Amino acid sequence: MTAKIYKPARNAMQSGKGKADIWLLEYEPETRLTADPLMGWTSSGDMKQQLRLTFESKEQAVAYAERNGIAYWLEPEAPARTHRKSYADNFKWGRNENWTH
């Protein structure tokens, strides 16, 4: 079974950086999801699909996978994009955006 080690994306609803420094190890699904004939719900017999392990660093996640003999692939970390903006830009003369108040 293969696992994916990655750093999850930040929540779009928050501007802070809380919980942004964790790494996750998730297993790839072994079996296909099947539809229940009675209710129509999707289900699977693969219980490892529900498992998500969190680590403080990429090195800890890789060490865990190697120590337990788990085949893994490492998703590269996305570069952090910063937007330079100051509070004074809200009141700048000739700004492109409309006023919102």
Image: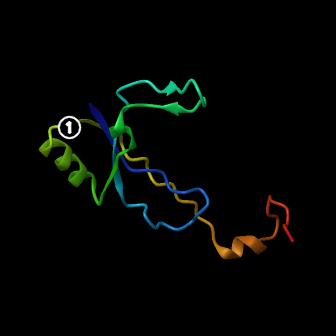
Q: Is residue 1 above or below residue 64?
A: above
Q: Which residue is mark 1?
A: 70
Residue drawn at point x = 27 percent, y = 57 percent = 57
Q: Nearer the viewer, residue 54 or 89?
A: 54
Q: Is residue 18 left or right of residue 95?
A: left
Q: Is residue 27 visible?
A: no
Decide which of 37, 76 is in the foreground and name it: 37
The extreme left residue here reads 67
Residue at 43%, 31% (x, y): give it: 44
Outermost residue on the front side: it is 38
Above or below, 32 against 27 in this view is above
Q: Residue at x 26, y 30 (%)?
A: 1
* Residue in the foreground of this view, choosing between 85 and 101: 101
Q: Quadrant of residue 72?
A: top left
Q: Amino acid at mark 1?
A: Ile
Task: Give 76 or 36, whichever is nearer the viewer.
Answer: 36
Q: Residue at x 43, y 64 (%)?
A: 19
Residue 59 in the image: state x and y as whole percent. Answer: 22, 52
Instruction: Specify few, some or many for label 1: CA neighbours under 10 Å numbering under 14, 14-19, or 20 or more.
Output: some
| 48 left or right, relative to 33 | left
Q: Quadrant of residue 37?
A: top right
Q: Using residue 64 as the reference point, say whether residue 29 is left or right of it.
A: right
Q: Is residue 17 visible?
A: yes
Residue 95: x and y in percent read 79, 63
Residue 101 point in image, percent of width and height: 87, 71
Which colour scheme appears in the figure? rainbow
Task: Give percent across and percent down for residue 22.
Answer: 36, 58
Q: Secondary structure at mark 1?
A: loop
Q: How many labels were placed on the picture?
A: 1
